Image (tube, rainbow, N blue to C red):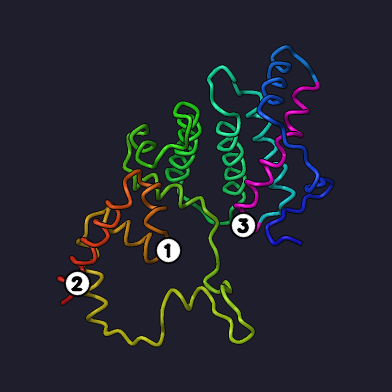
Amino acid sequence: MSRHKVEIVGVNTSNIKVLTNEEMKSLFERLKNNDKFAREELVNGNLKLVLSIIKNFREVNENKDDLFQIGCIGLLKAIDNFDPSFGVKFSTYCVPMILGEIRRYIRDNSSIRVSRSLKDLAYKSNKTKEELSLTLGRSPTIIEIANYLGVSEYEVCDALKARKDPISIFEPIYNDGGDTIYLYDQIEDRKDNIELELKLSLNDAINKLEEREKYILDQRFVIGKTQVELSEELGISQAQISRIEKKAIDTLKKKIN
């Protein structure tokens, strides 16, 4: 069995029909003319889209059947609200709708308590992302979402991160048949006996960095994102990310030497 295959009860996931562009246009035209079977055909012809999105939530501790059903709700909403006259591909409009439904479901079922203001901003950010995706014909950048809402890009990033499922620091991340390596082992190397003065000096130096520099260093060396991922997230070029990263590292070196 493929490790990336999603098994859904009552659905033969290996034999789902995929609609062509012409078939999609025809079905939406029929739906516009109140054809009661067109909606069902549109749903059945886009189930693979729901399944492909669910694969992005492999690490989430939620029943995949439940996520599939929630994803289908997002698909139905997209079908009912899609207007082909806008000239936007259905998948471009549909994917944020499905993602939004699934993320709201996961957020509402999370055991971690997030402040109401952060929840509200996260909801507004995702709602804005859906609206801008339709207007722009592509997924908007974090900066575009922040400008639309009148907040900083870092507030948007924090709000969206707060809705992600946490994982245990004792989560096993590697095992080659010997000792298991846990996430905790990657957070702190207990073999390195760093002097307390150096730790305090480093913390003080980090606190004096600009907010963007701190965010990029955190995402690069703690979270593990690539420069390309950060450039897409912040809406600036990879070269700019590289320059900001290098400047921040040089600043830290000067302050702790």
Magenta-highlighted stretch: main secondary structure?
helix
Tell me where residue 203 appears, x and y as whole percent.
25, 70
Which disc is residue 224 wearing?
1
How far apart are the two marked residues, 2 and 3, measured between alpha carbons?
38 Å
Q: Which residues are magenta?
A: 37-61
The residue at 75%/13% (across/down) is: 34
Tag 2 secondary structure: helix
Asked whether 131 or 86 is in front, the reply is 86
Amino acid residing under circle 2:
Lys
CB under 8 Å between callouts 2 and 3? no
Q: Quadrant of residue 40?
A: top right
Residue density around tag 1, few if under 14, some if 14–19, many if 20 or more, within 10 Å:
few
Q: Quadrant of residue 94?
A: top right
Q: Is residue 46 magenta?
A: yes
Q: Earlier in the sequence, mark 1 or mark 3?
A: 3
Screen quadrant of the C terminus: bottom left
User: Which residue lies under the disc numbered 3?
Assistant: 60
The residue at 66%/40% (across/down) is: 49
Q: Which residue extends farthest right?
A: 10
Q: Earlier in the sequence, mark 1 or mark 2?
A: 1
Tag 1 secondary structure: loop
Tell me where residue 171 appears, x and y as whole percent.
57, 71
Q: Earlier in the sequence, mark 2 or mark 3?
A: 3
Question: Is residue 158 shown left or right of residue 251?
Answer: right
The residue at 66%/34% (across/down) is: 75
